[in-house]
Image: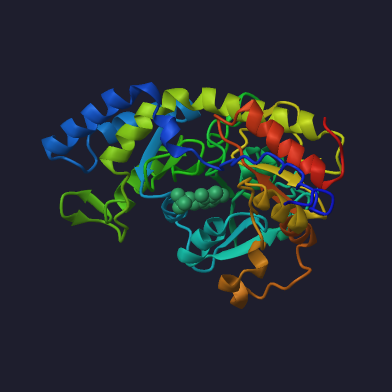
Amino acid sequence: MVDLLSAPPAPAPAAKTMRVARYNYPLDFGEGIGELTADLQRMLLAGRYVLTEEVSRFEAAFAEYVGVKHVRGVNSGTDALILALMALGIGPGDEVVTHANTFHATVAAICLVGATPVLVDADDRTWEMDADPLDAAVTPRTRVLMPVHLFGKPGPMEAVTAVAARHGLRVVEDAAQSHGARVGGRRTGSLGHVSAFSFHPSKNLAAAGDGGAIATDDPEIAASVERLRSLGQSGQNHHVAIGYNSKLHAIQARILEHKLPSLDRWNEARRQAARGYRERLADLPLRFQPEDAGEEHVYHLFQVRTDRRDALLKHLVDSGVDATIRYPAPIHLQPAFADRGWHPGQFPVAERLAGELLTLPIRPDLSADEQDYVAERIRAFFGAGGA
Ligand SMILES: *Cc1c(COP(=O)(O)O)cnc(C)c1O
C-alpha cells in the first residue's frame, strides 16, 4: 500500500515549453508555389540555365526596388563585395576602411582582392560603424569606405558620404543584411557608388541557396562586374580581364523574382515583431538597437544587449528558444586575421558588443504566442513577473 504521507511531493507541473525557431525558410514561398514550380519545371526542360531572361528580369526588378539604375546578379554576397572592389580597381597597396563589428565576409572580400582592411570601432549607441574615427583612419592609400548596414539598420551614411567626398574616396555599401531598409526615404544599397547584396537563405530576401548582386548607378561599374562575373569576357571567348565565374543562377533569379513583391510586407512583419519584443521586455535591464529618426530598420537580426548574455543564452536555449550570438568575436580577434597586426583592446566597443549581444529569433511569421513565450522566459531569467 502506498504511504501517501511519506511519498515525495508531486513535481510542480513543468513550465510549458515551446520551440521557437530562428528560421522558417519554406514559408516564404507562400501560396504562389505552384505557379513558381511550374515555371521552374519549364526552365529546367528548356535547357537554358545561365544568364537567361529570368536573370535580367530579376536584375531589372531589384534595381527598381533598390532605386538604382543597374543590378548584376552574382554567386553570393561575398562575391558581390569582391567584384565591386575589383570593378573599382582596388587591389594590393590600397586600403579599405570598414567596421570591426561585421560578418567575416566583409573583411575577407577586402583581403581577397589583395587590399588592406583598416578597421574602425563600433558606435556604442547604434552598434553600427562609428563615424567619428573615420577621418583619422584615412591615409594617402585609402581608396574606399565600406560601411555595413549591420543587423538591418542603416549605417552612418551621411557621415560616410561626407568623409568620402572630402578625401575623394569611393563608397561600397555592404547591404547584405539590409534589403529594403531606408534612410531619408532612400533604400540602403543606393547610397554609395556601388553596393553588395546577399541572397543567402538566412537574409531578408533569400534564394534557395547562395546568390548575390551588386547595385549601382554607374554604368561602367555595372559593365565591369558583368565582365568579371563571366571570366572577364567582353564577347564569347574574348577575355579582356581576369575575372571569376560568379553568376546568379537562373533558377535562383526566378525564385527571387517570385519573392521580391513580398519583401516590404515581410520587412514590416519583422518590424512589428521587433516592436512586440520591445514592448514585452521594456522594463528589463536590456538594451535595444535604436531606430533613429528618418530611418527604417528591417531587423535582419533582433539583438538585445546585456552583461549576463551567456547565462541568458543558455537559459533560452534550454527553454527551446533558438537564440544565438552574432558575432561572438569581432573581426580583429578572429584567427583568420591574426597576421594583420590587430590586438585585443584595439576596438573596445566591438569587443563589448561581442560579449553582450544576444540574437533573438525574428521571422516575418513570428507569432504573438512565440513572442509571449520568449518574453516570459527572459522575464523569468531576470526574476521579473509577467509583463
Ligand atoms: C551574409 C553577409 C555577407 C556575405 O554574403 P554571402 O551571400 O553569404 O556570401 C557579407 N556581409 C554581411 C554583412 C553579411 O551578413
At 39% from the left and 40% from the top, the residue drawn is 207
Q: Nearer the viewer, residue 321 or 291?
A: 321
Asked if residue 165 can be seen in this view, the reply is no
Q: Is residue 278 left or right of residue 371?
A: right
Q: Picture quarter containing residue 329?
A: bottom right
* Quadrant (top left, top right, bottom left, bottom right) of the C terminus: top right
Q: Is residue 205 left or right of residue 302?
A: left
Q: Nearer the viewer, residue 43 or 371?
A: 371
Q: Residue furthest left?
A: 46
On the image, the x and y values in percent for residue 278 come to 76, 32
Q: Is residue 295 left or right of residue 141?
A: right
On the image, the x and y values in percent for residue 304 come to 74, 44
Q: Nearer the viewer, residue 225 or 1?
A: 1
Q: Looking at the picture, does residue 62 appear above or below residue 330?
A: above
Q: Residue furthest front?
A: 1
Q: Nearer the viewer, residue 166 or 295?
A: 295
Q: Is residue 311 left or right of residue 119?
A: right
Q: Picture quarter containing residue 186?
A: top right
Q: How is the image coloured?
A: rainbow
Q: Looking at the picture, does residue 379 appear above or below residue 65?
A: below
On the image, the x and y values in percent for residue 185 come to 62, 23
Q: Looking at the picture, does residue 317 appear above or below residue 37?
A: below
On the image, the x and y values in percent for residue 277 come to 72, 33
* Number of numbered discs: 0
